Amino acid sequence: MANFEVPVRFYKDYPGGYDYGYEDLALPLERSCFLLVDVDGSYSFKGERVPHPTTQNYIAPALEAARAVKMKVAYVHNDLRLVADPGCMAGQFWNRTKIPNGDLMESWTRRPDYEPVYVDCVAPRPGEPNFPKWMWSGFRDTFLDQRLRSWGIENLFVVGYSRRACLHYTCAEAMGHNYRVILLRDCSNPPGEIEFPDTLDDSLPEGGWVNRMMLRQFEHLIGFTTTSAEFVASCKQVGESA
């Protein structure tokens, strides 16, 4: 069984610690999976639909590297149609917090033939399962866990959106299912993007204290982090030693 060695970071949350820790993890490649959370969709730029810069410049190269070493790949995406009714408490609350007017759940009932749309650089390939989810976590009421266990997966390299919602909760529940989680920390929302206007702080490398808090929360409670470049380099080493 081939080992896959990747440099990781975590946060030491104890007296005398309170600082980042670093080490190299040697993980069995055959027991590792590259998981993409909500990377479907595109952004409007000067009237055209284009990939999110993070998706194109960081997630896509990491995905390509994972495929090159034949690492298993899986996706999860949002699909709220099964819970789109007036009695959905989440919908009732989100109508107040996410949109100024209208009914968020009702809009899903008008999409009977919905399929997630991906830009080419991160589109799923045959044999890469893509599980619909209705809540933040890719493990809640889906068959993601069963598929991963059938593959013998122990380690998840996770990318996607957003750091304070679906990506975070998917990672937290992955740990709850006893997976080792390694988040590619630059393969998510860039500095400041998930910030509320009153939480922006240019003096922080994360762009604001919400983004900083979510990353710190992850690195001391849920799992390790690495970067796209470090992951790609680790995959290249596997390919060179094969």
Image (cartoon, rainbow, N blue to C red):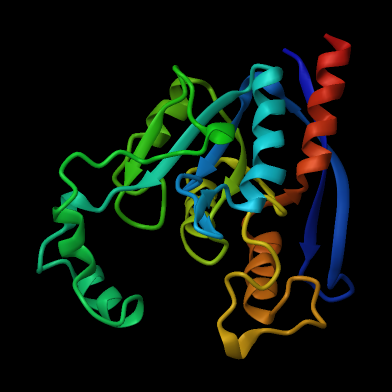
Picture quadrant of residue 214: bottom right
Q: Residue furthest left?
A: 86
Residue 57 in the figure: left or right of residue 142: right
Q: Residue furthest top?
A: 242
**Residue 168 placement (x, y as % from top left):** 53, 59
**Residue 114 placement (x, y as % from top left):** 25, 42
Q: Nearer the viewer, residue 106 or 234?
A: 106
Residue 65 in the figure: left or right of residue 160: right
Residue 82 in the figure: left or right of residue 128: left
Residue ID at (59%, 52%)? 52
Q: Residue furthest bottom?
A: 198
Residue ID at (32%, 77%)? 99
**Residue 139 placement (x, y as % from top left):** 40, 45
Q: Nearer the viewer, residue 44 or 22?
A: 44
Query: Total of numbered circles in the picture?
Result: 0
Vertical order, 223 against 199 (above or below): above
Residue ID at (70%, 63%)? 220
Vertical order, 86 against 45 (above or below): below
Residue ID at (71%, 45%)? 57
Picture quadrant of residue 109: bottom left
**Residue 73 placement (x, y as % from top left):** 54, 27
**Quadrant of the rendering where the N terminus is positioned:** top right
**Quadrant of the rendering where the C terminus is positioned:** top right
Picture quadrant of residue 198: bottom right
